[in-house]
Image (cartoon, rainbow, N blue to C red):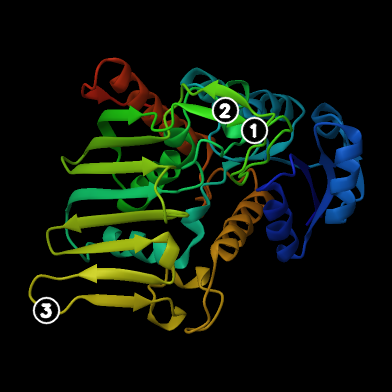
C-alpha cells in the first residue's frame, strides 16, 4: 500500500489537532504546511516538526508529493482551496462548514465526483464511541420510533464585548456565526444518530452583543477578553445566539438552541432523542456517559466500556472501561476511518465507515443552515430544507 502524504493548510486552533490525529495513525506523513505568509508558516512548521512550509496555499496544492489536503483555515477560504485541491487531483479533508453557500457546496460535491477524489468534512463528534452506541441502538429499534429530537450547543467565549476572533470578521466568516459554526455540528450529529433528516425549520437568531471592541492586533480563534485602549468599536451583523424549531422527515418534532454568549457553557453540546420505548441523551462535556431513559423502570447511565457496547460502536472505544476518552480521541477515530477509506479508494462498492461525513453530508447541513437563515429573513416562518442529491 502506498504511503500517503498529507498537507495542512491553516495551523491555528484546529490545524495542530489534524496533525496530532494523523500522526497517531502511524502510517501517514504530514509532509507540508501552508500559512498566510512564509515566515509564520516556517515558524509553525518548526513547532509542529513538519519538514516543508509554504507561504501560499496554492504552492502546497501544486506540490506533487501531497496526496491529501487538509483545510483548517477561516471559513471563507474553504471553498476556493477545496476547489483548487480537487482540480489538482488531491483528496480533501475540510473543516466545517464546507462552503459559504449551498451553490458552492453543490459545486464542490460535483467537482469531487468528476475528479474521482475522496472527500470528507470533519464533523468530529461522530467519532465518539457513545455517539456510535446511540446510533446503533436507535437503528436497531431499542428505543422505538423517535418523536422528539432536541438539544443545544452552548458556549460562553463571546459573552463580553471585548471578546474577539477572526470568526467575527465578515470577510472570513460568511453569512452566519453561531448557526454555521456550532449549529452545523448539532444538525449533522442529530441526523447521523437518528437516521432522520431535518425537513423544515423555523429559526429566530439574535445578536446579543451588538457592538464589539476589535483589537488592533489580529486575534486567534478564541481570543481572551481584554481589548486594549486602541481597540475599535465594530457593529455586529451575525447572530451569536439562536433558537430553532425543527420538523423531521418521519414526522418527529425538535428544537435546537445555539449560543456563544452563555456563561459557564464551554462546549456544551447536548443531543436527546425521545422515542416510543425510551430516550437517549449524550452530552459532549460528559462524553463518556450515555443517559438512557425508561418509563417503567430505573433510568440507566451507560459508561464508556467496550465490553458493554454494541459491536458497531465497540471499535471506537480504544481504552478499557474506566479510562476516559476525550475529544482528541474521537478526532483520531475520525482520521482513522478517513484514511482507511482513502487507502481503499475508489472501491465504489465499499460502504464508508459511519464516522465519515462526506461533502454530500456537508451539503445537507449547508442546506439546513441556509433554510434557517431564510426562515429568519422571512420573519420567522416555517421553511423547507432544500433537497440534496443522492450520495
Residue closest to the eye, 280 or 115: 280
Label 3: how many Cα within 10 Å (few below 14, some 14–19, many 20+): few
Label 1: how many Cα within 10 Å (few below 14, some 14–19, many 20+): many
| Camera-side mark, 3 or 2 | 2
* Residue 391 in view in this figure: no
Cβ–Cβ under 8 Å for marks 2 and 1? yes
Position of residue 366 relative to residue 145, above or below, is: above
Q: Which residue in the protein does label 3 denote?
A: 297
Residue at the image position 61 percent from the left and 36 percent from the top: 165
Tell me which numbered mark, 2 or 1, is placed earlier along the sequence. Answer: 1
Q: Secondary structure at mark 2?
A: helix
Pinpoint residue 140: horizontal percent, then vertical percent: 27, 63
Q: Which residue in the protein does label 2 denote?
A: 173
Pinpoint residue 64: horizontal percent, then vertical percent: 87, 36
Q: Secondary structure at mark 3?
A: loop
In 3D space, how far apart are the residues under numbered discs 1 and 3 (Cα atoms)? 48 Å
| Image quadrant where residue 114 sits | top right
Image quadrant containing the C terminus: top left
Pinpoint residue 383: horizontal percent, then vertical percent: 25, 23
Tell me which numbered mark, 3 or 2, is placed earlier along the sequence. Answer: 2
In 3D space, how far apart are the residues under numbered discs 3 and 2 (Cα atoms)? 48 Å
Q: Which residue in the protein does label 1 denote?
A: 74
- Pick out the residue farthest to the front: 229
Position of residue 76 relative to residue 334, above or below, is: above
Amino acid at each position: 500500500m502506498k504511503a500517503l502524504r498529507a498537507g495542512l493548510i491553516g495551523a491555528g486552533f484546529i490545524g495542530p489537532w489534524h496533525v496530532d490525529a494523523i500522526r497517531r495513525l502511524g502510517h501517514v506523513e504530514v509532509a507540508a504546511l501552508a500559512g498566510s505568509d512564509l515566515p509564520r508558516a516556517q515558524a509553525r512548521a518548526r513547532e509542529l516538526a513538519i519538514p516543508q512550509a509554504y507561504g501560499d496555499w496554492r504552492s502546497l496544492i501544486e506540490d506533487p508529493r501531497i496526496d491529501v489536503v487538509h483545510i483548517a483555515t477561516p471559513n471563507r477560504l474553504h471553498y476556493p482551496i477545496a476547489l483548487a485541491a480537487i482540480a489538482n487531483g488531491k483528496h480533501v479533508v475540510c473543516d466545517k462548514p464546507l462552503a459559504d453557500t449551498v451553490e458552492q457546496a453543490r459545486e464542490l460535491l460535483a467537482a469531487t465526483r468528476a475528479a474521482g477524489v475522496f472527500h470528507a468534512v470533519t464533523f468530529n463528534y461522530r467519532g465518539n464511541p457513545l455517539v456510535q452506541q446511540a446510533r446503533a441502538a436507535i437503528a436497531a429499534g431499542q428505543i422505538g420510533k423517535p418523536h422528539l429530537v432536541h438539544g443545544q450547543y452552548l458556549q460562553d467565549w463571546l459573552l463580553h464585548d471585548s471578546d474577539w476572533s477572526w470568526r467575527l470578521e465578515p470577510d472570513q466568516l460568511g453569512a452566519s456565526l453561531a448557526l454555521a459554526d456550532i449549529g452545523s455540528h448539532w444538525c449533522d450529529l442529530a441526523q447521523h444518530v437518528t437516521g432522520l433528516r431535518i425537513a423544515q425549520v423555523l429559526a429566530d437568531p439574535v445578536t446579543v452583543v451588538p457592538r464589539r471592541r476589535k483589537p488592533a492586533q489580529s486575534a486567534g480563534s478564541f481570543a481572551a477578553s481584554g481589548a486594549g485602549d486602541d481597540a475599535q468599536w465594530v457593529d455586529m451583523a451575525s447572530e451569536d445566539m439562536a433558537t430553532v424549531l425543527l420538523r423531521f422527515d418521519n414526522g418527529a418534532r425538535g428544537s435546537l438552541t445555539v449560543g456563544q454568549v452563555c456563561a459557564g457553557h464551554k462546549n456544551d453540546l447536548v443531543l436527546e432523542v425521545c422515542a416510543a420505548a425510551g430516550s437517549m441523551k449524550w452530552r459532549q462535556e460528559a462524553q463518556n456517559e450515555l443517559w438512557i431513559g425508561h418509563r417503567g423502570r430505573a433510568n440507566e447511565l451507560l459508561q464508556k466500556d467496550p465490553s458493554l457496547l454494541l459491536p458497531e460502536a465497540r471499535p471506537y472505544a480504544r481504552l478499557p472501561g474506566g479510562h476516559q476518552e476525550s475529544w482528541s480521541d474521537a478526532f483520531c477515530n475520525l482520521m482513522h476511518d478517513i484514511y482507511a477509506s482513502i487507502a481503499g479508494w475508489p472501491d465504489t462498492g465499499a460502504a464508508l465507515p459511519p464516522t465519515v461525513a462526506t461533502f454530500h453530508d456537508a451539503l445537507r447541513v449547508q442546506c439546513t443552515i441556509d433554510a434557517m437563515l431564510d426562515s429568519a429573513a422571512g420573519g420567522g416562518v416555517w421553511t423547507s430544507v432544500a433537497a440534496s442529491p443522492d450520495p
